[in-house]
Amino acid sequence: MVKKLRYYARFIVVCLLLNKSAMIKKLMEQLAQYVEDYNAQFKPSDYAEWNVVLSEISTFLEAEKKLAPVDMEGNPLTCIGRLKYEYAKNDNTQRLKLQEAILVGNYQNQIKFSELTLDMYRMLQSLEREPSLSGGFTKPVPQQAPPADQTTSGVGMTSIEKEPEEDAKSKRSNPRKHLLYRPTFAQLALYVATCFKDITENNCLLIYISADGSKRQVKEGSPNEYVGGIATAVNYTRKAPEKIDADQSALIHTFHPQDLIPFTRKPMFLIVDSNNSTAFKEFNKVFNQPFVCLMSPVEYPTSIKDTTQIGSLFSLFLHCPVKAFAFISDLTQIQKEVWETSITKIEQIEQFISDLIEQDQTLGKKLLT
């Protein structure tokens, strides 16, 4: 029975990643029934834990549902926040392609299911291209009758024409992604170093960090202007020391901007979603390699309603701007035509921004997702 429950939980994660809402609803109903049957038959000690799993799934789906306006007939309006286009042009400009992506969720209080936080899920979707029917499939070739003087041992066999290796690579254009839920500093540093090693020429690394800030209290007039970084999880494998300086402990378990400097020997795209994101604004670029850093606001206007139940507003804007605009505008019902027009406008803006980047002669290598 436990294997069946785990199977359903993992299947729900797969359906989440594939945006199969109808299937998730059916699986949820079946999983809830199996959990009740499991409790009735075995009276297990982990019954409460499975109820937590059900609660996490419901909260996760409810957060997404709150952001979806409805049309005039009450039907939810959808928007798939995935990559659709490659803004590549046939010229001799050297471009960077995203090869590796590290997505970190390290907020203590965050909406999650299993080890997938809501913000990580949105960024994961944003780095996926819409699946194509032609991608990843091989083409069957009609079987020709063998010559009369040739004998065959197989009956009814068909040959498969394999695609050229270059074509196969071009269709697998999604970057390789690493999801880290509440990693320690050592774990995060290990993944960054491993991805750095794997980055090949004309490729770049993306690091997305959604985490609590770790601010350092600097005494007034002190020459040390260091203001901290991003908090990482603490995992004491041994007995924790009885006496430890709080400031020293915070320094040890903080991911500092300076920790990334050695890895900027290769192109990097950094996204920091934190209440201490501004710690990365004075990032030292010492290796003359392409580097981009997007930092979230550290505070929001009081006119924006509570965002604790819908995840990070900054990550939402990166994932699906039209949903974010609807949320901050408090729009819960929109005409379908207006919604579709808004999505088209957003796509046009993204195309315009891409064209501006392409025309900028000061950027050197261009960035191609």
Image (cartoon, rainbow, N blue to C red):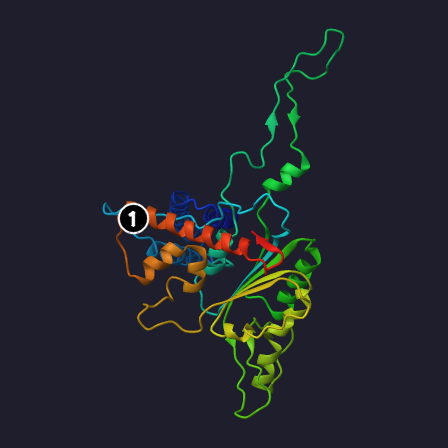
Q: Is residue 58 visible to the viewer in this orientation of the structure? A: no
Q: Residue at x 52, y 52 (%)?
A: 127
Give the farthest residue toward the left: 72
The image position of residue 44, as x and y in percent, is 47, 57
The image position of residue 131, as x and y in percent, is 51, 41
Q: Residue at x 50, y 55 (%)?
A: 356
Q: Looking at numbered disc 1 in the image, what kind of residue is underneath it?
A: Val
Give the farthest residue toward the right: 149
Q: Rate crowding at label 1 as few (under 14), some (14 to 19) or many (20 or more) other CA atoms within 10 Å.
A: few
Q: Is residue 330 visible to the viewer in this orientation of the structure? A: yes
**In the rendered view, would you say 369 is above or below 228?**
above
Q: Residue at x 64, y 21 (%)?
A: 158
Task: Name the residue nearer the viewer: 155 or 76.
Answer: 76
Give the farthest residue toward the bottom: 221
The image position of residue 231, as x and y in percent, is 55, 73
Task: Name the residue nearer the viewer: 167 or 307.
Answer: 167
Quarter of the view holding residue 255: bottom right
Find disc 1 in the rendering and name its residue. Answer: 338
The image position of residue 25, as x and y in percent, is 38, 46
Label 1: state its secondary structure: helix
Q: Is residue 22 left or right of residue 262?
A: left
